[in-house]
Image (tube, rainbow, N blue to C red):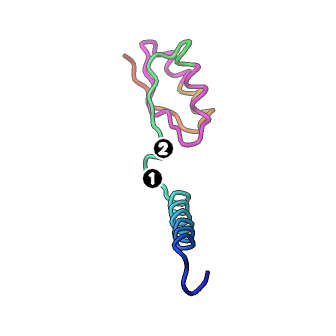
Amino acid sequence: MTANPTRRQFIKASGATAATVSLSRIAWSESKNDQISLAILGLNGRGRYLAAQFSPLDGVEIAAIADPDSRLLNERAMEIEVLSGKKPDTVQD
C-alpha cells in the first residue's frame, strides 16, 4: 500500500482485516452450546431409530430415555451406550 492510500485501497484493506479477525474468532471459539443433550420418549419404532441416528454424532448426547416398559428401557440404554460410549439416564413413565 502506498504512503497515501486512496479511499478504495483503504476500504479493501480494512475489509480484509475485519474479515480475517471475524473468521479467526469464529474458528477458535468454543461454546458450552456446542453440545446438544436430548431425551427420547418412547423407545419402539421412531424412538429407537432416533437413538440410533443421534448416538454416534459428535456434539450430541442422549442424556435420558423414557418408556413404560422397563425391559425395553434397559435394552435401549445398552444399545445407546455401545453407539455413543455413554449410558443415558432411564425413566419409566
- The residue segment tinted magenta is 49-76
| Residue 19 shown in magenta | no
Residue 76 at x, y = what percent? Answer: 55, 22
Q: Is residue 67 left or right of residue 84?
A: left
Check disc 2 and report its element: helix, strand or loop.
Answer: loop
Residue 84, placed above or below residue 16:
above
Residue displayed at 54% across by 38% down: 86
Quarter that holds the C terminus: top left
Mark number displayed over residue 31: 1
Instruction: Rate crowding at label 1 as few (under 14), some (14 to 19) or many (20 or more) other CA atoms within 10 Å.
Output: few
Residue 93, placed above or below residue 4:
above
Q: Given the image, on which type of amino acid does mark 2 rest?
A: Gln
Residue displayed at 52% across by 18% down: 47
The residue that mark 2 highlights is 35
Residue 57 at x, y = what percent? Answer: 60, 37
Q: Given the image, on which type of amino acid does mark 1 rest?
A: Ser
